[in-house]
Amino acid sequence: MSNASQGGGGFGPPQPVPGHGYPQSGPSYPAAPPVAPGYATPAQPNNSMGTTGLVLGIIGLVCSLTFFLWFFGVVLGILAIVFGAVGRGKAKRGEATNKGAATAGLVCGIVATVVLPLLGLVAFATFVGSANTF
């Protein structure tokens, strides 16, 4: 068939033939059933605080072990303590499910903030003390 027999007259784009082509609207689906009164959908656990505490604690440990980045390790350790404590609180209230990760972040933060800088200070004092004896 040519454009002229389809009603196009030979000029411009062909005109649609009734009954051919795509439907004007898609199929309609039934709506979701309403939630029964008194029942709510369970809330998703919010594990972001505990996970953030764990990540900051690990990075703080690594930074505290290096000589030039110990200050960043202390700062990240403090942040890990805060986020880990908040994450543990959420886990105790049932708002989160990662109490172990939050606890690990809290412990890593304490080690990065307190223990490793103290060990570094003791090692530095030992080194300086031994250098003065010669």
Image (tube, rainbow, N blue to C red):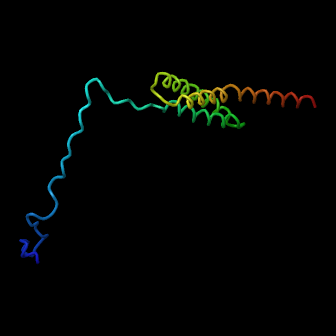
The vertical placement of 28 against 129, above or below, is below
Depth check, front residue: 80 or 12:
80
The vertical placement of 69 against 40, above or below, is below
Rendering coords of residue 15 (x, y %): 10, 67
Rendering coords of residue 74 (x, y %): 64, 29
Left or right of 116 in this view: 127: right
Rendering coords of residue 106 (x, y %): 60, 27
Q: Would you identify the image quadrant in which residue 63 lies?
A: top right
Depth check, front residue: 111 or 47:
47
Q: Residue at x 61, y 32 (%)?
A: 57
Left or right of 81 in this view: 37: left
Q: Residue at x 21, y 40 (%)?
A: 31
Rendering coords of residue 10 (x, y %): 9, 76
Q: Which quarter of the image is occupied by the C terminus? A: top right
Q: Would you identify the image quadrant in which residue 11 lies?
A: bottom left
Depth check, front residue: 24 or 65:
24
The vertical placement of 30 against 12, above or below, is above
